[in-house]
Image (tube, rainbow, N blue to C red):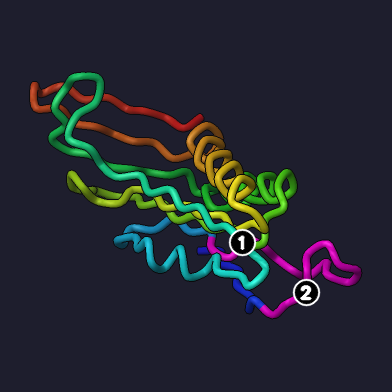
Amino acid sequence: MSEATHSPAEPDPGAPGADAFDVVRMCEVRDTPLSVDEVFAVVQDRAAGGTAVFVGTVRDHDHAREVSSLSYSAHPTVERELRRVMEKVAADFPVRAIAAAHRVGDLEIGDLAVVVAASCPHRGEAFAACRRLIDDLKAEVPIWKHQGFADGGDEWVGAC
């Protein structure tokens, strides 16, 4: 797990001498349950006027097929790649804080699979940063989903 945290009282990332300021507050891939409250709490920042959170859950169907089981697996470089994606989002938006947590292992229908959040000075920026984070995570981070279907079939869905 690579996790960086700081208190909301730290300097503005754009301010002189703020090089050590790290807006990536959580970057985790884990086999334990995720918490929306935990992710939301780490992106709180007194300079943020908007915080957007996205929660991805395991659904009971995919492309009109009933899902009976689901498991996520990840490449050993997953947290490094996730951090790279997060830093890219933070460079493109005025992010005050950003966080991402993704599950691996066997999940049940309704379980939280991924939680991402971004805090920015304004709501539009927070929505855009959060959307970009989840879209880029799904497209670029080496996490694979193995779905089992009620009809006996299965499939692998890869992130990249």
On whether residue 22 falls in the magenta region, the answer is yes
Seen at 50% across and 64% down, the residue is 1
**Mark 2 lies on residue:** 11
Q: What secondary structure characterizes most of the magenta part?
A: loop
Compute the Cα span from label 1 to label 2: 16 Å
Q: Is residue 116 above or below residue 148?
A: below
Chain part drawn in magenta: 9-26
- Say which mark, if any, is on residue 49: 1
- Residue extending farthest right: 16
Q: Name which residue lies at 64% across and 54% down.
A: 122
Name which residue lies at 51% across and 52% down.
52
Q: Is residue 112 above or below residue 128?
A: below
Question: In the image, what residue type sits under mark 1?
Answer: Gly
Amino acid found under the numbered disc labelled 2: Pro
Return the x and y of residue 136 as percentages of the image width and height: 56, 37
Structural crowding at the residue carrying mark 2, measured as other residues with C-alpha within 10 Å and reported as few (<14), some (14–19) or many (≥20):
some
On the image, the x and y values in percent for residue 56 come to 35, 44
Which of pointers 1 and 2 lies earlier in the amino acid sequence?
2
- Judged from the image, the secondary structure of the residue bearing numbered disc 1 is loop
